[in-house]
Amino acid sequence: MTKKSSLKDKTILAVDDEPDVLTLLAEELDMCQFIAKTNYDEAIAYLMAHKPDLAILDIMGVNGFELLKVCTGKRIPAVMLTAHAFTMDTLKTSIDMGAKAFFPKEKVRELVPFLEEVITAGHKETWQRLSERLGELFNATFGADWKKHLIDVGPFIVTR
């Protein structure tokens, strides 16, 4: 017996200027209503008229941080998905602005189980689980002491 996904019947908005990323996300998220937008203007128009259950936002190419502001204002959980902007500064900004997670595009095939947790878990718990799941990648990218830079950032829980 397979477990029912907490994403089933949810509406998920994904905004990315790379059509192949949107295609991959659509395949991975086949259990829900998937809305794809390729630019900021399309995404803003959609967000002004609708309230999806979750948003997946690219940072570069679609003005992801501005979209995150809108999502946060409408209480739409948002996950930042990025390749080129996978930096400590964008991680900090994502946390500060209320994103539920910060995910590298190279790990997109691992995104669904995490999104299921984003839908059901609290904000701090979500960031803690992201740290546990992607800790090795974060260590390799940001250095072994990357958490020290985030201690004073709102929702992040540092494990020792």
Image (spheres, grey):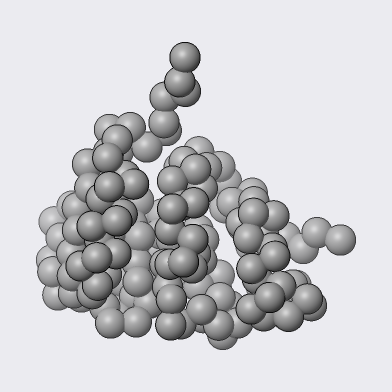
Percent across and percent down for residue 72 are 39, 63
**Residue at 49% across, 61% down:** 107
| Depicted 147 relative to depicted 24: above or below | below
Residue lying farthest to the top in this orientation: 1
Q: Is residue 99 visible from the viewing direction of this image?
A: no
Q: Quadrant of the C terminus?
A: bottom right
Q: Quadrant of residue 121?
A: top right
Residue in view at x 44 percent, y 46 percent = 112
The answer to which image quadrant residue 96 occupies is bottom right
Residue for point 28% across, 82% down: 61
Out of 141 and 15, give the one closest to the viewer: 141
| 154 relative position to 81: left or right | right
Q: Is residue 100 left or right of residue 125?
A: left
For the point 25% across and 61% down, the residue is 22
**Quadrant hosting residue 73:** bottom left
Q: Nearer the viewer, residue 4 or 68?
A: 4
